[in-house]
Amino acid sequence: MKAIHLPLVTHLHHHNLDLTKNRVPKVYAYQDVVKTSKKSNRLGEKLSNLLNIQKNDPPPSTHSTLNNIHEDKANTPTMSPKEDISDRWRDIHGVHEWEGLLDPLHPLLRREIVKYGEFAQATYDALDIDSFSEYCGSCMYNSHKLFDKSGLNKSGYKVTKYIYAMSQIDMPQWLERSKLTYTWSKDSNWIGFVAVSDDEESRRIGRRDIVVAWRGTVTPSEWYENMQRKLESIGHMDSKVEHGFLSIYTSKCDSTRYNKSSASEQVMKELKTLVDFYKTKSAEQVSLTITGHSLGGALALLNAYESAANFPKLPISVISFAAPRVGNIAFRDELYQMGVKILRVTVKQDLVPRMPGIVLNESLQKFDDLTGTLEWIYTHVGAELKLDVRSSPYLKRGFNFIGIHMLETYLHLVDGFVSSSSTFRSNAKRDVALVNKACDMLVDELRIPTCWYQLAHKGLECNSYGRWVRPKRDPEDIPSPTSREENTYGF
């Protein structure tokens, strides 16, 4: 298997790590989100003024009917019956760069975008973000429970592998750490998973689909401020990518429990096993779809780059949400040459997709005749589905840096998007209440509590003596650094 050639040192010496600095607020740490939001919004407003992003006008006076509409939908399904896309899957996964499918948005493509977005959302929903938990930063459930607990038991996919990551540089806001002295890991975090479609879903979608979902961050201000705005070489050509993203993807250390191998090595080993099994032994059509939100979208691109180098004939697509720029023009061009299909879902008011390279970016390419090819500027890759917060009557107006960036906000907007010239679709089925899982984006008339997604009693249970205690994790849900996630298909 080809390996990414990296000039930076990714094999770490444990004693050089300082893991006590800049402890990360929880992804769904509700009080922390409130405290962070003021700082985030101040930064966001400064950047929005710089970029001339127009603040939203007050919403039209339709709120009196919104709650009635929401209540009317309460007893209806949150998704339509699945349609057979076996004869159209290549179009839906970008064989023609999604030409003619984005504006207006094709209903079959909308459903697939939401499907992959929900895989990425599961990496947030199942993450233990309790700083008083000895398992903070791990997945709360084993791989067989993940989709059940995340509401994805009808997805038609099964998890085959968990991925863990660490970083050799100080990148706050993605690494969750416990306050306790004894923890499951002081170095690593659960960063995503690999899953594969079952037989029934494979028949519906026309091939055996392998999915990699990468976790990101929903408090982007600090990692923007601390981001190493430095391009590092990747591969053997002129391609360069952001130093911090590459560190998370490739870092490892012999003295750690979960990252003796890097996230890159873990995922590539699993992909090779799955591709060999389904393509070589079973002679099936196989595809690879990589998804992620925010930082996870950046990791998805790095994963796609490495996968395309190792599986040159495998159809590879990336569907990312709120992803920042990752690399330079050469990196973009090399991804195109390798045939990777990339769809970026963005929101006009979200600032993260404008980072890094707010000023020095792909827009300078039009001056190539004067400057020559600029190897040191950042550029986006792929087709873009651009959404607007103002299109939804359910969302508050005003600048909410965290709320706008939330993946649930993105999925809500995708579900309601018809075209850039149409209103929010009235028959959108996805539950609107999900938007407020970890933020305050829904209009008050809907009466959906802010940041409502949390464990009952914040994880405490009343025991037989009437005392409130922290329950022990089920042994099967405790992460093990030595045992591979048992593969559902028995190979």
Image: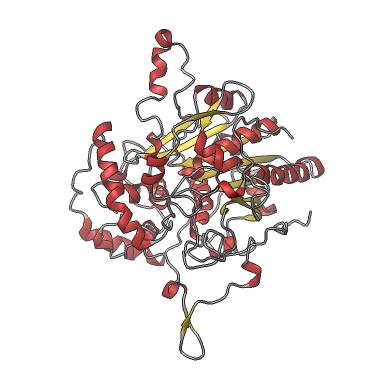
Q: Residue 286's quadrant in the figure?
A: top right
Q: Is residue 349 above or below residue 82?
A: above
> In the figure, is residue 459 to the left or right of 452?
right
> In the figure, is residue 307 to the left or right of 378?
right
Q: Position of residue 151 (x, y in %)?
A: 52, 62
Q: Position of residue 94 (x, y in %)?
A: 55, 33
Does residue 270 appear in the picture of this structure?
Answer: yes
Does residue 440 appear in the picture of this structure?
Answer: no
> In the figure, is residue 337 to the left or right of 319?
right
Q: Position of residue 486 (x, y in %)?
A: 72, 59
Q: Position of residue 110 (x, y in %)?
A: 47, 44
Placement of the N terminus among the 4 image quadrants: top right
Q: Total of numbered circles in the picture?
A: 0
Q: Is residue 74 above or below residue 275?
A: below
Q: Which residue is farthest bottom?
A: 465
> In the figure, is residue 65 to the left or right of 205?
left
Q: Which residue occupies 39% across, 19% down?
A: 364
